[in-house]
Image (tube, rainbow, N blue to C red):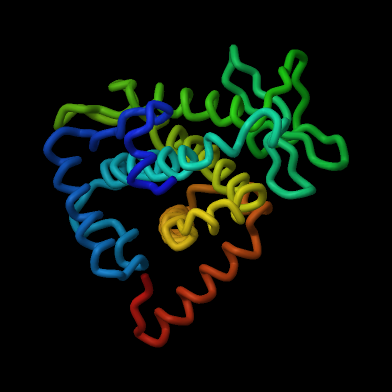
């Protein structure tokens, strides 16, 4: 199944449009143009004179759409049988999701409970499979993107004071889907001949979140080696004046 075929599957949510009206559309065009240039380092930078929240909003929607499509290619392979729990390698088992409060809890190999990046305990978690976990997460993210009090759809409507905190939580949760894909389904991605697309999307995601400090380093541990490699290559290429795609 190719990405183009997956775009037409019923398992996909409709692709999200750009927020903030015409301004969002303009910024989305800028994103597409700079990505098309092959210079990802430049593509993630805040355009001169633009509002940071507008830039975060447009890119957050874009990242949601990318992960939505990527994960959708695996829906027939990522099942409750093949993935009874949401893992990200042997050390990271994302076992529970509090549906009522939309809090994601993870348990590592030491039996400690991780609540979206912080050690904590919760009284009523529920055990879910990887596809259930992914469904809950994507539903929650979609609800945030659809909430015009958080992601304004009309030009001139202000973003809420906690907007950047919401964006950080969304991106942190999208990263968990990437971590599961790389650790549990990368060979399937290779067999589908989609690894180049996955790697480009993830590289874009890493450079953007790094540029604005949107995900704490501890949260990135499941893919730390890949991320360090991406950032080192980009830094080295930047120093040499080389463009990277």
- Where residue 174 appears, as percent x and y from the top left, is 51, 40
Where is residue 108? Give x, y as percent. 80, 40
| Side of 159 relative to 66 (left or right) | left
Most foreground residue, 34 or 188: 188
> Would you place residue 90 above or below residue 168 in this image?
below
State whether residue 139 is above or below residue 21. above
Front residue of 124/17: it is 17
Q: Nearer the viewer, residue 171 or 199?
A: 199
At a point 66% along the width and 39% down the height, the residue shown is 117
- Identified at 78% across, 32% down, the residue is 113
Query: In the image, residue 18 lies at what x, y percent?
Result: 23, 37
- As drawn, 235 above or below 86: below
Quarter holding the C terminus is bottom left
In the image, farthest residue toward the right: 110
Picture residue at 59% right of the left edge, 42% below the top: 176
Residue at point 67%, 28% (across, down)? 80
**Residue 37's quadrant in the figure?**
bottom left
Q: Is residue 181 left or right of residue 147?
A: right
Q: Quadrant of the N terminus?
A: top left
> How many numbered marks have been drawn onto this rendered protein structure?
0
Residue at the extreme left of the image, as rendered: 22
Left or right? Give the position of 137 relative to 25: right
Locate residue 81, reporting x and y percent.
70, 30
Query: Residue 187 appears in which quarter of the rendering?
Result: bottom right
Name the one closer to the observer, 203 or 231. 203
User: Which residue is the extreme one toward the bottom?
Assistant: 240
Write down the quadrant of residue 57 in the picture. top left
């Amino acid at each position: 199944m190719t990405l183009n075929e997956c775009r037409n599957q019923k398992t996909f949510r409709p692709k999200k449009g750009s927020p903030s009206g015409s301004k969002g559309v303009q910024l989305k065009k800028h994103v597409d143009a700079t990505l098309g240039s092959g210079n990802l380092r430049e593509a993630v930078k805040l355009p001169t004179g633009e509002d940071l929240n507008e830039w975060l909003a447009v890119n957050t929607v874009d990242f949601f759409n990318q992960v939505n499509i990527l994960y959708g290619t695996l829906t027939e392979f990522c099942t409750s049988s093949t993935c009874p729990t949401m893992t990200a390698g042997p050390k990271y088992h994302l076992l529970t999701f509090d549906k009522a409060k939309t809090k994601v809890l993870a348990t590592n190999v030491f039996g400690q409970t991780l609540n979206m990046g912080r050690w904590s305990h919760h009284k009523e978690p529920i055990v879910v499979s990887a596809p259930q976990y992914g469904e809950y997460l994507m539903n929650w993210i979609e609800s945030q993107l659809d909430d015009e009090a958080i992601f304004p759809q009309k030009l001139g409507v202000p973003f809420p004071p906690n907007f950047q905190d919401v964006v950080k939580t969304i991106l942190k949760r999208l990263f968990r889907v990437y971590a599961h894909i790389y650790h549990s389904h990368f060979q399937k991605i290779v067999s589908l001949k989609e690894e180049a697309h996955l790697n480009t999307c993830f590289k874009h995601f890493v450079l953007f979140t790094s540029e604005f400090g949107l995900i704490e380093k501890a949260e990135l541990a499941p893919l730390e080696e890949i991320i360090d490699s991406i950032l080192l290559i980009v830094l080295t290429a930047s120093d040499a004046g080389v463009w990277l795609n």
